[in-house]
Amino acid sequence: MSPHKTLLICSCDKTQSLDPEALQTAAAAEQVIMVDQLCGTDMTIAAEHLSGSNEVLIACRQQAALFERLSDDVQAETGQSAPLSTIDIRDRAGWSASSAKPARLHAKQAALMAAAQLPAPVAPVKTIQSSGVCCIVGTTEQAIRMAELVQDELGVTCIVNDAGPIQLPSANYDLARGQLTGAQGALGNFSLEFAKLQALNPAGRGALGYGEVKTTARSECDVFIDLRGGAPAFPHYEKRNGYFWADPAKTGELERIALTARDRVGEFEKTVYFNLEPSLCAHSRANQTGCTRCLDVCSTEAIFSFGEHVQIDSDICAGCGTCAAVCPTSAITMNETPFEAITQAMDVMARVYREHTGESPRLVIHTLGAGADAIAYLARYHDGLADDLIPLGLEQVDRIGHAEIMAAFGAGYAEVLILADTEIDRRAVAAEVELAQAMLTGTRNSPSRVRVIEAQELGEAGDNAGRVSEPVLLVGGRRDITRVTVGAMEDRLEAPIPLPAGAPYGAIEIDPDKCTLCLACVSLCPTGALGDHPDRPEVQFTENACVQCGVCESTCPETAITLVPQLDVSKDALSARALHGEDPFECIKCGRPFGVASTINRIVEKLENKHWMYSKSDNVQLIKMCDDCRVNAQFHGDTAPMAGGQRPRVRTSDDYLDS
């Protein structure tokens, strides 16, 4: 136990049951203090411990702001304040239906407490500079109105897209007319493209007008305000830093945007959510496209093709983590929520719960925003979470892929539920949930053990009749843990598990009638799943290394390769096996093996007596020779096509003397 931590727990006016000893052990605290109203009549106890030297952990997240202010007051009075942290065990575990089993609630509280003690991953940050250069695009009336709202803080240029009347020009912002045709970038680095751009001509008397028309023009800015009223310039525009899209039909929309946009000046810290290892990427080889899974799912278009691998724009990336969830080679990993941290939290919570109850818990994965709010509402006004349901909060549920789901089963959870905030979230996780369900079906377990749920299902009791598998050691990468977990779910898997199209596991089939053993597929395989034999023409395949990227299929000049999505957890998948091979052809002159027998025979069959070079001659024998023998035969034989005339005899001095 830590000699430097004090745990303060509160029954919240005697509305929840607590087990102080279990919580003290889970928190690794030196002492535990239990009260009934820590935010009210017992606040002096909190102040007393905050003035000490021990770290203080308060089991109340609802009043976290109050305790932080109390800590500041203690600091001001005494000149010191103990380190403070808070955790919620009430909404997520303490408040539940009257029929809930106290032992389960106490076990869940201890599980949440133990997981909170794990070190939090630290994500790097980058600095973004914004000089406040702002571009407003929209109708004349709306654009000028917005310019008037933000002109004191931002350097504004208005690009209007209509022929509305122009008031007296203002020196506080520029005005032009044109049509937006393209937009890229994020806060501090927007690049906008326009067609038919005309700058305002402020000189002269009478009605104002625009100048010469430019067919195309480009503009760069730090802040982009879009008042066109049509579709946003970016997908999932709300995640694009520095971009503001207004719905003209909403009252007060311009004022709302102006309040936020005015603050987008200065230096900002942007979290770098991801880590990219290009050498692991299976996107492309030799201009043959392979894996595009991350490109297909990125909602903000932050990922783009960059030669043989992908690249990610850290300014645009919003950190949803969908790319990492679908990446088959772990070329993309997340800094804030790495796979290892998620699996460790799952494992700790399941283990602590199991130690206290001897039962399997269920897991619900939710967002820290709307998902957490739904749980809090359910706890305060209804029956709360089911007593066996342990919550795991993440910034985005998109971060969860089949590997995280299977890791939860590997940790011993009976069910894995995903609470999606919106229909967009449901669609984002649908493919990975389908893949996990296919794996469960393949092990003769119910695919309903993993599903996406609505908030009203959080209080429903689950069937904990038995674990789908005994807990396994969650060590290794995503593919390793998936394979081990699926293998542990069934004592004996007689055949590979069929998976949906696009799954990152599988085999390949080679049509022997088409394959010429050119080995182009072997040379371009990005994961080393395909190899050759050192002594004979043969394609070898290691199924465990195959990510079904499709490079081999698109590379094969004979279209002889077919992808077969499946999961084989047997030992056979770990070692290389021959897919297709033949004996080499032996040179008819020297006997040296070269080429493939079927290919040589096929060439001879197609050319012999069917092409003028190979008719009424023995030239066809050249095809059956190795490189060296073919050259010798072409230059030195009696009927060699490239043979020169007979060389004249070398004359000596004797020849001249005799003549």
Image: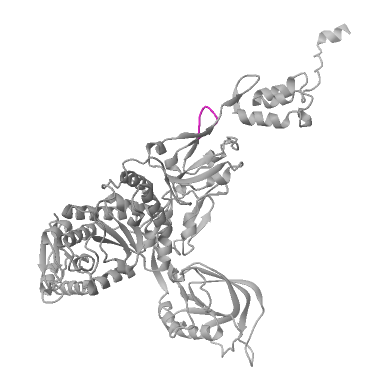
**Left or right: residue 569 compared with residue 100:** right
* Residue found 17% across the figure and 57% down from its top: 26
Position of 206 relative to 410 (above/below): below
Q: Position of residue 423 (x, y in %)?
A: 41, 68
Q: Nearer the viewer, residue 606 or 179?
A: 606
Q: Position of residue 34 (x, y in %)?
A: 10, 67
- Give the quarter of the image for residue 3: bottom left
- Residue furthest out toward the bottom: 206
Q: Nearer the viewer, residue 561 or 9?
A: 561
Q: Nearer the viewer, residue 428 or 75?
A: 428
Query: Looking at the rendering, in which quadrant would you find the C terminus?
Result: top right
Residue 507 part of the magenta-drawn span: no
**Left or right: residue 596 compared with residue 270:** right
**Left or right: residue 564 compared with residue 216:** left
Q: How many marks?
A: 0
Position of 491 relative to 426 (above/below): above
Position of 65 relative to 104 (above/below): below
Q: Nearer the viewer, residue 316 or 502?
A: 502
Residue 580 in view, yes or no: yes
Residue 4 in view, yes or no: no
- Residue furthest out toward the top: 658
Q: Position of residue 406 (x, y in %)?
A: 34, 51
Q: Which residues are magenta?
A: 532-539
* Residue found 14% across the figure and 76% down from its top: 40
Residue 537 part of the magenta-drawn span: yes
Query: Looking at the rendering, in which quadrant would you find the N terminus?
Result: bottom left
- Residue furthest out toward the right: 659
Main SS of residues in magenta? loop
Q: Position of residue 444 (x, y in %)?
A: 35, 48
- Give the quarter of the image for residue 377: bottom left
How are the colours assigned in the image? one colour
